[in-house]
Image (cartoon, rainbow, N blue to C red):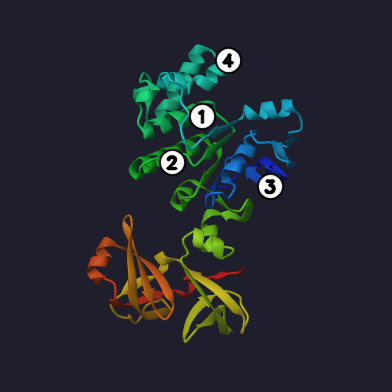
């Protein structure tokens, strides 16, 4: 993961109210130069509100934005800031003209001369794979082509901060994956600082260095993307980032950095600092669970349980398998593993996972 540079954008004690109701409360916010921050959370969590506020389009009821060390206090400060920040919406808002004219619209409004504008438009169009569409009317574009045009227009402005509000949500999966891949290359190649909102964890992991999880207008966890996914701060975050197995029990014993947790009449072994007698919630990610027909000896996995398959659900290239092992357990398998295990509801299997796959949920 790349390390962000010096702080580029900061906000303190930020509050946004709509119709007298508090919709966003952010005591502290900072974004490093070159950092890519993913805002994730359910609908209504405050992701779009935060982007609109950071774009200077939604004035906060309280708090202050600081850009490159300068507080944005006056309308003049805010106007200058807006020229260095670009916001891309979920639905592409294109003019009824050619692709080329759409990409160059912002540059033209800023008074850029035609030769330089033309070069900037060509460069941005090529980055997003639509150089061959420059002469096409925008109304004839597919959804993916229209969003590529919208992104090319934003990037042609060479913003210091690019804000993206769920720009892939209306696209079909193949188009979405291709566009995410191309955007990742553009951001990496240009070193652009970016914040994007999404409710899709896979999008966030593909693009983001850092994740902020929002719930009801507040950030409940903020940190490196893999840290948030593997060490969620609470059960809400755990559920949202796909840690579907959450187990509550009592610590029976601790020794040498490992602990034994009693869950009903079962016991699992995990790692971490806990105290004997402590009531604890732990989580296990489904991709860390291995299924087999029999418990195997000589494996490094210290947790192994017989279980019965209760449900099988397609998850794109994988299948989610739910098991009753005396407690609920979720696992992911490939199509090939499904065939080899002859998976079906009611089948008896064995589930194993390592002690290091047991993550303590502190709150």
Q: Nearer the viewer, mark 3 or mark 1?
A: 3
Residue 168 bears which disc, if any?
A: 2
- Residue 111: which numbered mark, if any? 4
- Which residue is labeled 1 in the image? 154
Dot placed on the residue nearer the N-terminal end, 3 or 1: 3
Secondary structure type for disc 3: strand
Nearer to us of marks 4 and 3 is 3
Q: How far apart are labels 4 and 2 at the CA level?
A: 30 Å
Secondary structure at badge 2 equals loop
Can you identify the residue that label 3 sits on? 21
The answer to whether mark 3 and mark 1 are in CB contact below 8 A is no
- Between marks 4 and 2 in the image, the one whose residue lies nearer the viewer: 2
Q: Is residue 198 left or right of residue 216?
A: left
Q: Is residue 53 left or right of residue 282?
A: right
Can you say whether 296 is above or below 114 in the image? below
Q: How far from the left and from the top, in percent, is residue 32? A: 63, 43
- Residue at the spot 30% in from the left edge and 80% down from the top edge: 294
User: Who is closer to the viewer here, 245 or 15?
Assistant: 15
Residue 330 percent coordinates (x, y): 40, 69
How far apart marks 2 and 1 lie (CA) works out to 15 Å
Give the distance between the C-alpha atoms of the residues marked 1 and 4, in whole angstroms: 16 Å
Between tags 2 and 1, which lies in front? 2
**In what quadrant of the picture does the C terminus appear?**
bottom right
Disc 4 to disc 3, how far (Cα)?
40 Å
In front: 6, or 42?
A: 42
Picture residue at 31% right of the left edge, 77% below the top: 349
Q: Earlier in the sequence, mark 2 or mark 1?
A: 1
The answer to whether the residue labelled 4 contacts the one labelled 2, judged by CB atoms less than 8 Å apart, is no
Q: Quadrant of residue 111?
A: top right
Residue at position x 76%, y 33% in the image: 73
Residue 101 position within the rendered picture, expressed as x and y whole percent measured from the top left = 45, 18
């Amino acid at each position: 993961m790349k390390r962000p540079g010096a702080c580029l954008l900061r906000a303190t004690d930020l509050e946004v109210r709509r119709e007298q109701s508090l919709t966003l409360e952010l005591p502290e916010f900072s974004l490093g130069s070159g950092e890519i921050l993913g805002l994730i959370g359910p609908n209504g969590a405050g992701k779009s509100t935060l982007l609109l506020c950071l774009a200077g389009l939604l004035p906060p009821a309280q708090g202050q934005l600081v850009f490159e060390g300068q507080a944005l206090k006056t309308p003049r400060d805010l106007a200058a800031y807006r020229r260095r920040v670009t916001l891309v919406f979920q639905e592409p808002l294109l003019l009824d003209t050619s692709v080329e004219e759409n990409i160059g619209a912002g540059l033209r409004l800023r008074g850029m001369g035609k030769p330089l504008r033309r070069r900037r438009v060509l460069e941005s169009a090529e980055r997003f794979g639509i150089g061959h569409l420059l002469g096409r009317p925008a109304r004839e574009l597919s959804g993916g082509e229209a969003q590529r045009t919208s992104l090319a227009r934003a990037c042609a402005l060479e913003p210091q901060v690019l804000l993206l509000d769920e720009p892939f949500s209306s696209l079909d999966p193949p188009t979405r994956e291709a566009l995410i891949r191309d955007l990742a290359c553009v951001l990496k190649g240009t070193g652009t600082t970016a914040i994007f909102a999404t409710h899709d964890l896979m999008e966030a992991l593909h693009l983001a260095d850092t994740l902020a999880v929002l719930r009801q207008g507040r950030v409940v966890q903020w940190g490196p993307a893999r840290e948030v996914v593997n060490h969620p701060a609470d059960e809400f975050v755990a559920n949202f980032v796909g840690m579907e197995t959450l187990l509550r029990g009592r610590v029976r014993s601790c020794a040498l950095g490992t602990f034994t947790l009693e869950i009903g009449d079962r016991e699992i072994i995990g790692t971490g600092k806990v105290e004997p007698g402590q009531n604890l919630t732990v989580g296990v990610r489904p991709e860390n669970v291995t299924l087999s027909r029999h418990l195997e000896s000589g494996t490094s996995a210290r947790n192994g349980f017989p279980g019965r398959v209760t449900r099988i659900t397609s998850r794109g290239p994988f299948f989610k398998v739910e098991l009753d092992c005396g407690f609920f357990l979720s696992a992911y398998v490939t199509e090939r593993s499904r065939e080899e295990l002859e998976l079906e509801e009611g089948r008896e299997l064995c589930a194993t996972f390592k002690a290091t796959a047991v993550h303590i949920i502190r709150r």
